[in-house]
Amino acid sequence: MNILYDDVADAVKWISSFGGLEQGGSTRLLYTTEWLAAQNALKEKLTQIGMDTYFDDVGNLYGRFEGSKYKEQVIMSGSHVDTVVNGGKLDGQLGIIAAMLAMKYLKENYGQPLRSLELISMAEEEGSRFPYVFWGSKNVFAIANNDDVATIQDNNGIKFVDAMSSCGFKFNSQKARTDIKAFLELHIEQGGVLEREQKSIGVVTSIVGQRRYNVRLVGEANHAGTTPMSYRKDAIYTFSRICHESINKAIKIGDPLVLTFGHVDPKPNVVNVVPGEVMFTIDCRHTDQAELKKFTEELEADMLGIAKQLGLEIEINRWMDELPIPMDDQLIKMLKDICQQENLSYRVMHSGAGHDSQIFAPRVPTAMLFVPSIKGISHNPAEDTKTEDLVEGIKALTYALYQLAYQE
Amino acid sequence: MNILYDDVADAVKWISSFGGLEQGGSTRLLYTTEWLAAQNALKEKLTQIGMDTYFDDVGNLYGRFEGSKYKEQVIMSGSHVDTVVNGGKLDGQLGIIAAMLAMKYLKENYGQPLRSLELISMAEEEGSRFPYVFWGSKNVFAIANNDDVATIQDNNGIKFVDAMSSCGFKFNSQKARTDIKAFLELHIEQGGVLEREQKSIGVVTSIVGQRRYNVRLVGEANHAGTTPMSYRKDAIYTFSRICHESINKAIKIGDPLVLTFGHVDPKPNVVNVVPGEVMFTIDCRHTDQAELKKFTEELEADMLGIAKQLGLEIEINRWMDELPIPMDDQLIKMLKDICQQENLSYRVMHSGAGHDSQIFAPRVPTAMLFVPSIKGISHNPAEDTKTEDLVEGIKALTYALYQLAYQE
């Protein structure tokens, strides 16, 4: 298969120039001028390769090669065009570039497909400008609630609805897509598993469920010199016991469970005062909802018990509870078979991060392909993948789209 | 003894009005207009009660009742006049007010002392404006190094030397005082021991030694979802193990050892990233230098071992190592005897905080009296002590000064 190294490298370079940063990577937030420039340039590029292109109401961009025999059956691929602030050159947009190169290759080599091939460049996934995520994919299925974004603003006080309007888009009035027969998303892993195992491709079996918490411990701020150990209600000591014991448990259980205490904010946070208060976060993920529930419920009980024993008040606020999302079994099998037949270096794995595919998967047959992230870095200008791995990933995607769109 | 409740309450109210805050308490930093106003007002007040008053080169204020028989033997009492930012109404200045009321009482009731009685209102102890502590007491003994403050500045870029000069003071050229026969300092406890034990007076046996550290752990920041537990170099987990295990040890050892992890600063400190780095502080205190050394050396070794085991880099920077300072045995015995004879409610205790007395004690016989801190609060506008406890403390000080200055 003739997916060219230089074509891939050039396409990544081209797309990341919209909102491009000096230090590499991009900042391309929803409904900004950089975002609109990228969508318009993609539209032009897709038109050039012969696709019919159109935007939906909210700014999802589509490029379509209509099927000759089953045009009402759509084989779709793509990802989101927005980035985080100081994001990389691959997260999201790689899935768009990959679909473009794969579909272009198929059209040039095999002509019109039997089923319709559609590329999607989704408006938004990251939630980096406005406090709302999956705006793009949710609008594909008409499950985004206009009311949820009617009053939200960005950090500069600009309303979501005004930003959308300034780009020429408006609230979704379209109907849910019911013609999608399969959705494939190629994405960077954003972890270090493929690199460590020297694999080029990850075939994703499921996206983890996640629960997130804010926890506040309230003890007593005291003088670090004049307060005997036995009088203390030390919030950082209490936090450290919770963190130490809970992570020890998580390590013992191991894959696919992960547990992170990412944010810790003690008060007053000075060298010579016993911390009287601490706010910390918990992020816990697992591919199995029952296991996730069991572990986090034990964790909640442990925290309550430790706080009570040490005489501190505790508030536990679970503000995220996302279910694990399995990918489609048949598509997983197809991707594995392709990797084996074409001698591509791959492993089966889950996704520890959320993706647009988790919105698609409950509604249409969906699968994901990962390519390695160098040092596991993402959401950062240093985010990178070897071009030879990108080529391998796009090859797998191309074979899969061929089977889905060109074969009876 | 006729130490009047109202006189004490009025004097505290009066002194705390210089740099007084709306919410109570004071901010009176070294060489500010508030500071100068307080020293000048004190000078006037001391003159009014018949003292000879004078400033030394750097702004320590003295008030003196010359002795009739042993005028070259000085019995000194006082404390520091500066406060922290948003400080209380007692820390430091209570010791000045107490000495003033005690000496005034003695002069009025017993006339001229045999030995000279001297009050000292020391320029500075807190280090709250400039990065230098004990400027006042160190200048009494000519051990402050002018070079150390020659270039330091406050947060507004004002040089120490210029601030000093603006108040009419200059670098120390005086000689160390060699005429001080005894120094007594009355101070608030700044802890909760006296209040819990319902005692009015603490007779201080020693001031703790303290070691302080900055510790930096460097692991790897990773995606909280895509990084298996076994791949992580989690700085907050490593910190939490160190903090949990070390404080457990300190609790087991107990008084007078105290151990505090007061400041914790993880990076990047967001919910969905495994913390790659953390800077934290350790404050460890004990009245016995050998015990302090033993505990902290074990702690250092434990931290190195834990970091090595978990694959993180660690930098341990011990930036403070102050020796414990014992108070004078004879003065301790005298204070205990007074409390017993006069039926004052007291206990013997150590000081977990640093005080001017630690500069005096290695050079002249020195002792301290504590009065309770309500809820242990200090360095805060809520800092307070019941006036009846203040009266008891000042009574003890007065009896002690009488014995030292009026008896053969």
Image: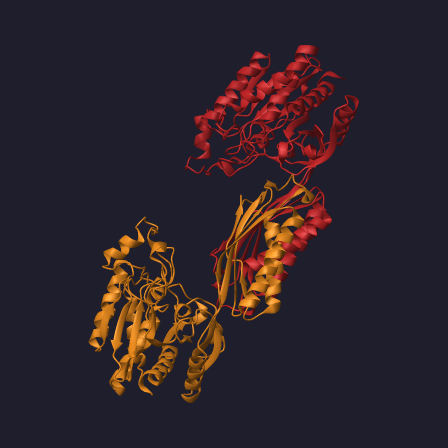
Chain colours: A red, B orange
Which quadrant is the N terminus of chain A positioned in?
Answer: top right
Question: Which residue is found at the position 36% from the left and 58% from the top?
Answer: B145
Q: Position of residue A70 (x, y in %)?
A: 70, 17
Where is residue B8, by image quadrant?
A: bottom left
Q: How many marks?
A: 0
From the viewer's perspective, is residue A333 above or below residue B175?
above
Camera-nearest residue between A230 and A276:
A230
Q: Position of residue B371 (x, y in %)?
A: 41, 75
Question: Which residue is found at the position 45% from the left and 30% from the top?
Answer: A163
Q: Position of residue A361 (x, y in %)?
A: 67, 33
Camera-nearest residue between A393 and A141:
A393
Q: Is residue B98 left or right of residue B267?
A: left
Where is residue B368, by image quadrant?
A: bottom left
- The answer to whether any part of residue A212 appears in the image is no
Q: Position of residue A351 (x, y in %)?
A: 67, 36
From the viewer's perspective, is residue A363 above or below residue B338?
above
From the viewer's perspective, is residue A365 above or below residue B47?
above
- The answer to whether any part of residue B289 appears in the image is yes
Which quadrant is the C terminus of chain A positioned in?
Answer: top right
